[in-house]
Image: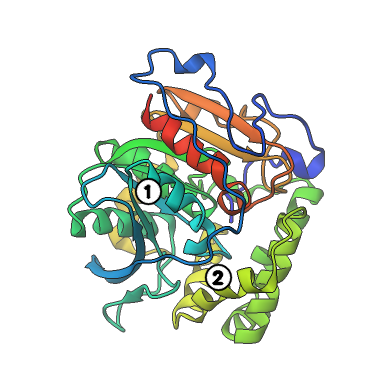
Amino acid sequence: MMNRRTFGKVVGLATGATVASLAGLPALSTAAAGTRATAPTLPPVTPGTHTSFPVLKQVRAGVLTIGYAELGPARGPVVICLHGWPYDIHSFVDVAPLLAAQGYRVIVPYLRGHGTTRFLSSRTVRNAQQSAIALDIVALMDALKIEKAVLAGFDWGSRTADIIAALYPQRCKALVSVSGYLITNLQANLSPLPPKAEYAWWYQYYFATERGRLAMQDKDKRRELARLVWDTVSPTWKFDDATFDRTAAAFDNPDYAAIVIHNYRWRLSLAEGEPRYDAVEQRLQARPVIKVPTIVLDAELDPFTAPDDSGYRDRFTGAYEHRTLPGIGHDLPQEAPTAFAQAVVDVDHR
């Protein structure tokens, strides 16, 4: 899920620098001076109000045919929402209608190995290193003739959006990144964390074993594991079985197990990447700064979230704001859709 950084919240909770209401209507900080126009205040939506997307599409992009949901006017300013693991596009099922009602064209793609996204060739390496996933989204933008978009994500999606914002700022109008700067530094990932922090990462060590790989290949065991992760990292989210089942259907992708296992093994330097991505990875290992306007959202009850942004604040050099959402867990856009959508609208008005 998140990059290995300072997991202060695992060791002990602290209050973030900026506190947002559960309704998701925080005021802009003083960092917002120079805003082009006043951002509208979005009407609150109860999490779980929507259960499906009205439009699902498919497009060839790079090495994939990517499945994605689309809402809003075809000529509206574009927002691309990016999910994480073990989640899918339904993390944005309440966010997307809020943004579409504001005139945005909202694109919510299944990442490689999830849902209806498929590899075009059986010979393509089932690679889930960070640069490959980010370049999938650039290819999607090219296929849909989207020159520039607001990028918003959490978990794998935050990392993907961070990479595009850092390396291809001409494609990123603004950024909403849950948990901040998540670009993986392989050398840093070799250093041990405090034991309580390592405990929260139990599944990535499980995936490093043959038993973990076999569990991911077993449909029932991977669903049970994902459900355990949901319960653990979102302790106050009272989702029902139907909500989980809608997302778990995305795990039936034939490449799901291979993608999940490779992602976590690569991040621990236990699996190789592909030479075609070496140049991009070399740039990422230098921890490039992000210059586009950014709002970082942190969930107070997410065990992977540090209590503040001190560990990565210097990586954001443009207009910037940090917001902490009390009482919210890891799947922030699904648990607090109004707060997430409001951040998108606010950062777009910087």
Cα distance in 3D space between marks 1 and 2: 22 Å
Circle 2 sits in a helix, a strand or a loop, which is it?
Answer: helix
Say few, some or many: other residues with alpha carbon within 10 Å of mark 1 (under 14 / 14 to 19 / 20 or more): some
Residue 238 shows up from this direction:
yes
In the displayed structure image, the side of residue 162 where residue 67 appears, left or right: left
Q: Amino acid at mark 1?
A: Ala
- Residue that carries the numbered disc 1 in the rendered image: 100
Residue reaching furthest to the left: 145
Residue 138 in the image, given as x and y percentages of width and height: 28, 53
Q: Earlier in the sequence, mark 1 or mark 2?
A: 1
The kind of residue tagged 2 is Thr
Q: Which mark is residue 247?
A: 2
Vertical position of residue 33 compared to residue 1: above or below: above
Which residue lies at the image location 20% right of the left edge and 44% below the top edge?
147
Q: Are marks 1 and 2 in contact (CB under 8 Å)?
A: no
The mark lying in front, picked from 1 and 2, is 1
Residue 112 position within the rendered picture, expressed as x and y whole percent measured from the top left: 40, 68
Left or right of 2? Residue 77 is left
Residue 74 rendering spot, x and y as whole percentages: 23, 52
Q: Is residue 229 above or below residue 29?
A: below
Q: Residue at x 74, y 59 (%)?
A: 238
Judging from the image, what secondary structure is the residue with disc 1 in? helix
Locate residue 168 relative to residue 14 in the image: left or right: left
